[in-house]
Image (cartoon, rainbow, N blue to C red):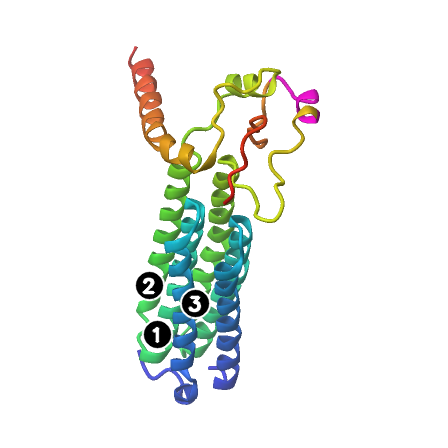
Amino acid sequence: MPEVLPGLSSIPFGVMHLLLGLAMAAMVFRFVAGPTEYDRLSAFECFVITLLSFIALQVLESDKAWVLDFILVMSIVGYLSTVALAQFQGLGELPDPERASEMFGGRAGDDVNRGGDDDISAGDPEDAAAPAQSAEAGDQGGRS
Amino acid sequence: MVHPVLVQSILWIGVFFTVVGALGVFRFGDVYLRIQASSKALTFGFGFIMLGVGLAGDDWRQLGKSLLAVLFMYLTSPLAAQLIAHAALYHMVVTKDEPTMPPDLDALAATAPTTRDTDSRPVPPDAPIPRG
């Protein structure tokens, strides 16, 4: 990669790096002290985006254009990890229509997951176990 | 390719929006507000920073890679934010200021269909509101 621009040395990269570092520190604080898991998820995604901006400024400063490939790959990895964690956290057990009709039709919601932190932490093994059982059932149905 | 003052202006715009988004993530008191701040301001700032980086190079490949990263981020960031918000809404994380959830259950049960479409959310009656 040849010299990028002769006037780029006048850009105060240190101030920009400092500001982006403060932004990443705020996101790390939100990741640590988030009240719910979804705060941590969103803080993780924000951290990835800000880190990519940081690396992009590093590209301009150090004149290494091949680092842009790492930015592309890291954006894909960050998006996929966010989607996987969101699926594992919240969307693991989608309610089936029978349960939903029970939920909406008159009965006072006896076996309804009422949410909250305790139920979220208690529901994680169920989230992990339910797709496995459905997958096994699907395999057996396919074989027979 | 481009004058450095223009590159510096675009970079400062991107840094400004990134810092404002981080301030929103730091200060807002709710999951949905934080998702809103992150998914709009941070993506906008990332787009400006990558545009500045792409314009600074004397190579068309650098601009292409930067715009590809911006396009991918603009495509995927709302999807991730919507997934996180959907997961938080499914587990009844309420807003901080006023409990907008659960809504009026009697009016909901009066108009409830027998089969449930996938977009409506499960609403347990008289659930304790978890303060998120």
Q: Amino acid at mark 1?
A: Gln
Which of the two discs, 3 and 1, sits closer to the camera?
Answer: 3
| Image position of A129 (left or right of B20) | left
> Which comes sooner in the sequence, label 3 or label 2?
3
Q: Kindly identify the residue that appears in the image at 54 percent across and 62 percent down.
A: B41
Which of A8 and B88 lies nearest the eye of the viewer?
B88
Q: Position of residue A54 (x, y in %)?
A: 38, 69
**Which disc is residue A58 wearing?**
1
The quarter of the picture where residue A53 lies is bottom left
Q: What's drawn in magenta, residue-wise? A: B107-114
Q: Amino acid at mark 2?
A: Asp
| Image position of B52 (left or right of B115) | left
For disc 2, the marked residue is A69
One can see residue B21 in this view: yes
**Residue B112 among those drawn in magenta:** yes
Q: Secondary structure at mark 3?
A: helix
Which of the two discs, 3 and 2, sits closer to the camera?
Answer: 3
Determine whether A128 is above or below A51 in the image.
above
The quarter of the picture where residue A122 lies is top left
| Marks 2,1: beta carbons within 8 A | no
Determine whether A139 is above or below A123 in the image.
above
